[in-house]
Image (cartoon, rainbow, N blue to C red):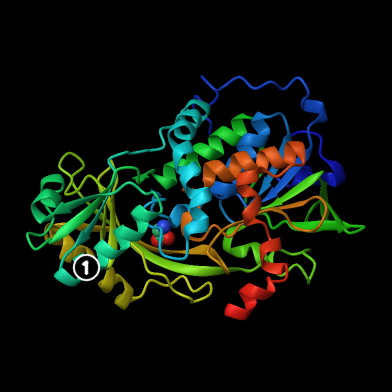
Amino acid sequence: MGCWPDGLAEIKPTEPDTGNAGEGRPVIDTTHASSRPRVAIIGAGAIGLAIGWRLAEAGCAVELFERGAAGRGASWAAAGMLAAGVETEPGEQPLLALTRPSQALWPVFAQELAAASGLDVGYRDEGTLVVALTRDDAEQLRNLAQFQRGCGIELTWLDGAGAREREPYLTPRVVGAVFSPRDHQVDNRRLVTALIAAATAAGARLYEHTNASVDLAGGRAVGVRCGDRRVPADIVVLAAGAWSRSVDGLPADLALPVRPIKGQMLALRMDPTAPLIRHVVWAPKAYLVPRRDGRLLIGATVEERGFDGANTAGAIYGLLDGAWRAVPALEELAIDEMWAGFRPGSRDDAPILGPSGIDGLVLATGHHRNGILLTPITADGIRDYVLTGALPEVLQPFGLARFTRPRPVAAAAHA
Ligand code: GLY
């Protein structure tokens, strides 16, 4: 244990399981480490861990506080799709300014993380197929693809035979498909395991099963409190996902528009040497994500149910039915797992990044359906903000202020 103020030594940091972590890590100039801010991060999911890793690499003293087990919230429940293309729906064009550059960062981010942690994060780049199973589906898919192409997203239309050439176990009924060559996937569970190893190897301290509240004094964040203990920090980063709004110590008037959006999922077990599918496949009523270890993830519902974590018969039936209609052979597969998670949804489905309006308190939350995709750009952008005080331009449209500033009169008149 290091030297902790106020008896904090009683909070035991989680021992890092680093394996050969550190080997081959990029060399970071820590010459000025002593002048780096001390940072406390509330929330150790993919976002908090990645910010902690990047800041620790840059020479900051980083403490991460997680109410449960690190990486076991939405980051564990996710499917790991890096789908800036096919997940873009009408109305979400502004989000492309963030999702596309983050998607482009992913290959290097995965390599750097593997080097820093010694762990492979299961990044796969086969692309994504969105399939139409009826003529109506095909019409809808053509319209959506036309919109997405208009946003500059690269897509190829395939007829039924072309779709089955790529994925032979697709139903013979498949009418057509869109192939998105840039929408890939990462194994999100491996990702958080690697982030824990990389962050702790870089010097970050991780406190699991520790409720931290924001410590405010004189109107600014001066650290966190864990029970009656105080941990001073120059900067506090709030990265608590769907729980961000309920973190203690936040002023009542900081109304963070973040709420849990429940997603139910399940996994089947394929033979990893003969997987039924190799691409991520979106069917009209479910998506299917094949992992190298043979797991086939099927997701996901989108439900306003608060923090109700139950798996329901109707939801699991609906997902299985949706997946089976696209890939009938999966009915032979064993069920491996069922689970539910809570996406941190914001009011406009985009993340909330940067200043909170309270000195010393920085926000990195509300990533909704895109937390894994947006991990690299969020981590780099928040690191730069903490180190320089200047929010990178790409993050600027995604601040909390967009919910609080008055709407322009003309826009309001047409609403
Ligand atoms: N991005 C996939 C999901 O939220 O279910």
Residue 123: image location, x then y, percent: 37, 38
Residue 27 lies, with reference to residue 315, above or below; the image says: above
Left or right of 374 on screen, residue 411: right
Seen from the viewer's position, the closer of residues 323 and 369 is 369
Which quadrant contains ligand 1? bottom left
- Which residue is the extreme one toward the right? 218
On the image, which quarter does residue 142 sit in? bottom left
Q: Residues within 10 Å of mark 1 (few under 14, many from 20)?
A: few
Residue 50: image location, x then y, percent: 58, 41
Q: Residue at x 18, y 45 (%)?
A: 275
Residue 403: image location, x then y, percent: 67, 67
- Secondary structure of residue under mark 1: helix
Residue 25 lies, with reference to residue 222, above or below; the image says: above
Residue indicated by mark 1: 139
Q: Residue at x 76, y 46 (%)?
A: 10
Residue 167: image location, x then y, percent: 15, 48
Q: Residue at x 52, y 57 (%)?
A: 94
On the image, which quarter does residue 246 sit in? bottom right
Seen from the viewer's position, the closer of residues 399 and 311 is 399
